[in-house]
Image: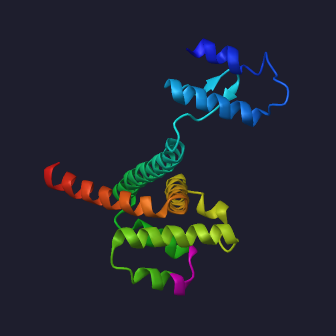
Amino acid sequence: MASDLTKTFDVSRQTPSGQSLEQLRQNYFIEASMSGNDAASIGGLQVNTNGRKGSVTLAEKKAQQATNDFLLLMELQRQLSAIEDNMIAKYGEDFAEQFAAEYLDEDTFNTIMQINDPEKRRQAFAQAINDGIKNGTIDANDVYGNPDFKQWLDKHDDVAQQRELAVSQAPEQTVELSKSAALETKLDNIFG
């Protein structure tokens, strides 16, 4: 069947006079649809014989991309947790506060210290230091003198960028995926 269609609609070998490429595609689409052929390319023509499935495929691709972005974000956060666990073991529970006190101004430092959750406080310190490096108020060479802290700050920056990308690409899917991930984490804590 495909060979018959190839002979009929192969534009690389035939150029029917008076027919545009779009007309050839339409003719092929009609012929392929009637014969049940869903091949995407015959004779150099690309057509969609699946009708409305093309738009579903695009939606599915967007959903898959949102899922991939979110899974990458989860992996980066897992890596950050491992780095922070190593930092706690090496420098103590308050490593972020000690490190940030050296580089942040007193007002910023005191504002961040009012955050009760230690993880969120560490995240805020890393964000403030990274922002200071980006805007030039903090010297990157001084901060990056300790490779452990450089790795910690870089991973925080990676997580922040990936979170921003995931939310900007598909905010509604990201929210739904984060809810399901939170549920999965709770179940892991209960059963794992």
How many numbered discs, if any?
0
Stretch in magenta: 103-108
Q: Is residue 107 magenta?
A: yes
- Tell me the quadrant of the picture where the N terminus can be found: top right
In the rendered view, tell whether residue 124 sits above or below residue 27.
Answer: below
Q: Residue at x 84, y 30 (%)?
A: 18
Q: Is residue 13 left or right of residue 179?
A: right
Give how far across and how far down residue 38 sits, in percent. Answer: 52, 27
| Residue closest to the far left | 191
Give how far across and how far down residue 75 sits, in percent. Answer: 41, 48
Q: Can residue 98 be seen in this snapshot?
A: no
Q: Residue at x 46, y 85 (%)?
A: 110
Q: Splitting the image into 4 quarters, where does residue 88 fall?
A: bottom left
Q: Residue at x 44, y 53 (%)?
A: 70
Q: Is residue 147 magenta?
A: no
Q: Nearer the viewer, residue 90 or 11?
A: 11
